[in-house]
Amino acid sequence: MTTGGIDHLASLIVVTLPDWLSPLPDAEQMRAVDRWAIEVRGVPGLDLMERAGAGVARAAEGLAPDGPLTVICGKGNNGGDGLVAARLLREAGRTVTVVSLVAPEELSGDARANLERLPGEAPVRLSGTPWSQEGDDRGAARGKEAGGDTAFQAAAIVDALLGTGFAGEPRGAVAEAIEMINNAGREVLSVDVPSGVDASTGIVAGPAVRATLTVTFQAAKPGLWINPGKGYVGVLEVVDIGIPRGAPIQATTGLIEPSVLQALPRRRASWTKFKSGHVLVVGGSRGLTGAPRMAALASMRAGAGYVTACVPASLQAILASGETPEMMTRGLPDEDGSVTAEGKESVLQSTERGGALALGPGLGRTDGAVSLARAIAREARVAMVLDADGLNAHAGRLGDLREREAPTVLTPHAGEMARLLEGSSSQIERERLRHVRLAASEADAVVLLKGDDTLIADASGRVAVSPGGTPALATAGTGDVLTGVIAALLAQGVDAFTAASAGVWLHAEAGREAARRVGVVEGVIATDVIAALPAARATAADDSARASAPGHDRQAGDP
């Protein structure tokens, strides 16, 4: 826990998160909270470290109720937290080997104080030899293989190497220690963040610990919920270390809560079908009629009162002959099953009564389709979701969208995002948070980067993160469903950031509900997700009501 001036705290308050986002402070914001607790509220740094280490010790005993334990400590306060845990575990009668990557005399501050409190054997080198002896502090080759060193034969290993302040690529003894931990084949508890994961962004630039359980302090950090870092966390547990309520800082990133549903309108008896929301789905081409159909059906199930699918005229009969007579269709000029630029006026005329557009599902990539998508996006004065080939039509042209007068939501996956930003999908996946913010800024729009950790960014820098955990959505057509859901919410007048975030929440919950209905996630198809949307909204609303009951209050300023 570091000390220093706190005058810069106000400069860190960039945006205010809505109440339905649980704040995810980054490393700098969390350090500022620590300084505020210590300097303004008078909480000793040693007390914060003691509570952190106690939380780790409890979690370690739960992870490995019996057998020896190994705690591997780095130089900083993360290592200090590990030393507290080692002391408490030894005092509880557990056999604990403490491995330190630095000589004891190199420790300072609160970490040094907790080294002096450590009972029993002194910390040893990574190689297993005492620091009091001459020797190499790098691990012996035998330690790199599971069972090759006694320290790595423990029932569980506590990773206290690198804390939330780390960024970059681990090197030297730290990289070697990470490799040894991963090769040991043991249960692993990481302290605050798996070593090697950037807690602020989720970037993994080199070797990183693959934890069974991560115990983080006071609040989860963005990198624990954002891939690729999310994939290293295992089970996530948040431990309260006694930061007083009311810390004067707001995170710019937050985790979506069920209470986002409270921001959505509910139909009233006086509403008409247009008041419930008119959605125009513009898309479809030969062989791709299912995409606009699913987007349209999803809009209906998400609450839109009137939905029109604008599709190639030669394919209109296919959509009109479906099992949902409530869906209207409008034929657009086409050539060989693909729309042409001449369809623009028909679509724009249909938007004159307001509502929202879902532009792109199944549209295709012919010259006519590309021209139509660009023209509609540029000239339509209603809220719009841009997806699929609507996105591809704007590859390298994100700036064109800045001229729009109405709210815009983009819903790319990593490949589509790479085309928008003229990069590669691997680059996008390495730095998901940076790229979603970059795209939102360039387009002056809300951008939703799909994934298990779906990220929703607006141009101000706010980011909402989906809790994910919905493998049922890994099937064809679910992206079209999400587009339809968001379009329905936009058509009802919900602001773009809230509509995208609530749409993601409903979509994920519908995936879980669909899996429960069919019995297994592998059996879920997109139409199952559409059918589950009403029940998902009801379930999420119930969860939200319970969370906002007395005893569940959370102040917006709390970390």
Image: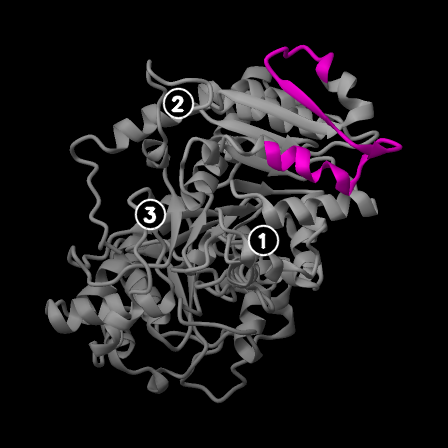
Residue 404 placed where, x, y %?
54, 52
Q: Amino acid at mark 1?
A: Gly
**x 27%, y 33%: residue:** 547
**x 49%, y 20%: residue:** 305
Label 2 residue SS: helix
Q: Is 153 colored magenta in this rendering?
A: no
Q: Is 322 colored magenta in this rendering?
A: yes
Query: What residue would you read off at disc 2?
Result: 539
Q: Amino acid at mark 3?
A: Ser
Q: Residue 335 is drawn in which quadrant?
A: top right
Label 3 residue SS: strand
Location of the C terminus (image quadrant): bottom left
- Please report the bounds of the magenta region as a residue range: 320-349
Q: Residue 540 is drawn in which quadrant?
A: top left
Query: What residue would you read off at disc 1?
Result: 185
How far apart are the two marked residues, 3 and 1, measured between alpha carbons?
34 Å
Q: Which mark is residue 22?
A: 3
Residue 229 placed where, x, y %?
53, 57
In this rendered view, identify the residue nearer to me: 78 or 347.
347
Label 1 residue SS: loop
